[in-house]
Image (cartoon, grey):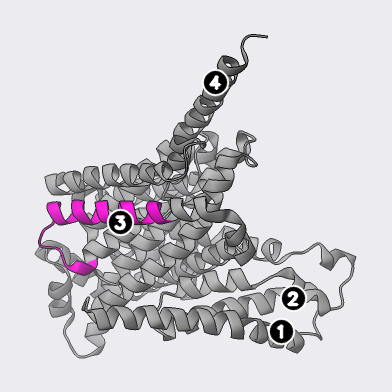
């Protein structure tokens, strides 16, 4: 296990050295090398995670944390640039407006030593190459998030939400509101000077749920068709929608800078108009795009139409003041292979679904996002007692808040298993935290505390879910024997 990690470390160090020092005839070569090094790291992280029986996202995240902090300690300029990411890009934007690099660095980096280090890198002979690599990785990761949320939406339908029933809706509402309020309270107690935007983003992140991890455990135990599994999966569908609505409201409050009733109502109104416009206008736009692609082969049409539709709705969501992932999720909900039935297809093309054609894009881009998240976790921030206190409080709030959701499920169900099934935050929590960091309401210390919460809830959920489901089966057997008597 140590040898693959060592290989990745050496590759990353080599990539950083080459990007920073070597001279290339093709200016794109360092970018290719840097992005490839991150992708190779993601592959090995995924492999190690699966060998240990853990979700892939966890391996990608931890390999990013390990490499990012190790290479940072060894003085890698490339990792420093990637670590600071969007803050550094905002700093560069100020220089385009006429501000000096030194003044811009002092404005965004409180530590004078770090600020001077950033100035030296930016003004160095390979500063532009390093910035180009970091910017390219950031763009790839954003594409990864968009396609990840599209595929989540693709597996969601209005019919499924209707059939999920009232118990699932109750679990989803409790699973969103309870950790949201608990997280808000913990953050306010530990960080009383934080802005309302930071507090709201912490609450929204704690309210998220990653259904993919839970679904895998349910499949392994062959209980996917049990009543508890139906409630959990149905609640996760509602949770995705509720989480994105909460994200839209919180992001709108942060951007507008106020929490006034009028501003909140405006955000809710824009969200409602977006949903109505997409649900009614989306199918028309989709059919129009398909009609324009009739001269292409079926699989080509599916690829082009899907890409254009997803990017178009993501842009439209941003245009009305919502997060791009909301548009991507809406595109997934709307799209269906049935729309492409009008195209002439041969036997091979019929077997190529939208999901199968988009999976390769997701497989390449999404791991880059999770490794990048890991690279941006600063372990030195945990030297602060406040960060440990905040992380511990968020972990407790995250666990208790989701267990409460199982209580409202109903007495005849395994309420403990349902609460634990809603526990993992996984990729959804990381997306929320990343958006908050991009908006400037989550700093490095808070970001590290949230990532630690995501890691712990994601690691503990599978084994606890297995235990609770088996415990529930044993209890049901005991009850049945006590009522029927020994045979």
Confirm whether residue 23 shows in the render. Answer: no
Of the numbered discs 1 and 3, the one sitting upstream in the chain is 3
Of the numbered discs 2 and 1, the one sitting upstream in the chain is 1
**Where in the figure is residue 302, as x and y percent of width and height?**
72, 74
The CA span between labels 2 and 1 is 7 Å
The CA span between labels 2 and 3 is 38 Å
Span of residues in magenta: 173-197
Residue topped by disc 3: 180
Would you say the residues marked 2 and 1 are in contact, meaning their CB atoms lie under 8 Å apart?
yes
Would you say the residues marked 1 and 3 are in contact, meaning their CB atoms lie under 8 Å apart?
no
Q: Which quadrant, please, contains the C terminus? A: top right
Q: Residue furthest right?
A: 347
Residue topped by disc 2: 339
The CA span between labels 1 and 3 is 39 Å
**Where in the figure is residue 433, as x and y percent of width and height?**
34, 60
Would you say the residues marked 2 and 3 are in contact, meaning their CB atoms lie under 8 Å apart?
no
Judge left or right: residue 65 versus residue 409: left
Label 3 secondary element:
helix
The CA span between labels 4 and 3 is 36 Å
Q: Residues within 10 Å of mark 1 (few under 14, many from 20)?
A: some
Residue topped by disc 1: 287
At 57% from the left and 43% from the top, the residue drawn is: 229
**Where in the figure is residue 110, as x and y percent of width and height?**
12, 66
The CA span between labels 4 and 2 is 50 Å
At 32% from the left and 80% from the top, the residue drawn is: 265
- Residue 238 or 41: which is nearer the viewer? 238
Residue 479: which numbered mark, if any?
4
Assess whether residue 419 is covered by the magenta stretch: no
For the stretch drawn in magenta, the main secondary structure is: helix
Q: Residues within 10 Å of mark 2 (few under 14, many from 20)?
A: some
Q: Residues within 10 Å of mark 3 (few under 14, many from 20)?
A: many
């Amino acid at each position: 296990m140590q040898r693959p990690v060592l290989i990745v470390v050496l590759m990353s160090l080599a990539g950083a050295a080459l990007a920073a020092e070597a001279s290339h005839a093709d200016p794109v070569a360092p970018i290719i090398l840097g992005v490839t090094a991150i992708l190779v790291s993601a592959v090995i992280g995924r492999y190690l995670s699966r060998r240990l029986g853990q979700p892939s996202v966890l391996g990608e995240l931890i390999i990013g944390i390990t490499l990012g902090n190790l290479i940072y300690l060894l003085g890698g300029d490339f990792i420093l640039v990637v670590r600071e990411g969007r803050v550094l890009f905002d700093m560069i934007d100020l220089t385009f407006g006429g501000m000096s690099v030194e003044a811009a660095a002092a404005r965004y980096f409180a530590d004078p030593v770090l600020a001077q280090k950033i100035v030296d890198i930016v003004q160095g002979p390979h500063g532009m190459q390093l910035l180009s690599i970091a910017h390219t990785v950031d763009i790839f990761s954003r594409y990864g998030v968009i396609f990840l949320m599209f595929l989540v939406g693709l597996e969601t339908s209005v019919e499924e939400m209707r059939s999920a029933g009232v118990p699932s809706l109750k679990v989803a509402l409790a699973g969103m509101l309870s950790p949201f309020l608990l997280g808000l309270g913990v953050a306010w107690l530990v960080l009383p000077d934080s802005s309302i935007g930071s507090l709201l983003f912490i609450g929204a992140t704690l309210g998220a749920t990653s259904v993919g991890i839970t679904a895998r455990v349910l499949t392994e135990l062959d209980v996917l068709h049990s009543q508890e599994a139906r409630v959990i999966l149905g609640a996760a569908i509602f949770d995705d929608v509720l989480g994105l609505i909460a994200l839209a409201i919180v992001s709108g409050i942060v951007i507008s800078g106020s929490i006034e009733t009028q501003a909140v109502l405006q955000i809710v109104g824009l969200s409602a108009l977006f949903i109505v416009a997409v649900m009614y206008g989306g199918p028309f736009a989709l059919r129009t795009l398909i009609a324009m692609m009739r001269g292409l082969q079926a699989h080509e049409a599916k690829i082009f139409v899907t890409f254009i539709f997803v990017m178009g709705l993501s842009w439209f969501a941003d245009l009305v003041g919502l997060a791009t992932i909301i548009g991507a999720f809406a595109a997934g909900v709307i799209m269906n292979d049935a729309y492409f039935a009008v195209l002439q297809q041969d036997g091979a093309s019929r077997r190529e679904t939208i999901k199968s054609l988009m999976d390769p894009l997701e497989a390449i881009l999404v791991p880059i996002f999770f490794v990048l998240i890991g690279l941006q976790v600063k372990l030195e921030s945990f030297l602060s007692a406040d960060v440990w206190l905040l992380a511990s409080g968020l972990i407790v709030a995250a666990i208790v808040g989701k267990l409460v959701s199982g209580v409202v499920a109903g007495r005849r169900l395994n309420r403990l298993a349902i609460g634990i099934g809603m526990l993992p935050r996984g990729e959804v929590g990381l997306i929320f935290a990343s958006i908050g960091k991009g908006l400037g309401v989550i700093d490095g210390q808070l970001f590290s505390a949230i990532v630690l919460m995501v890691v712990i809830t994601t690691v503990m959920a599978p084994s606890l879910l297995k235990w609770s489901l088996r415990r529930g089966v044993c209890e049901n057997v005991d009850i049945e024997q006590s009522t029927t008597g020994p045979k």
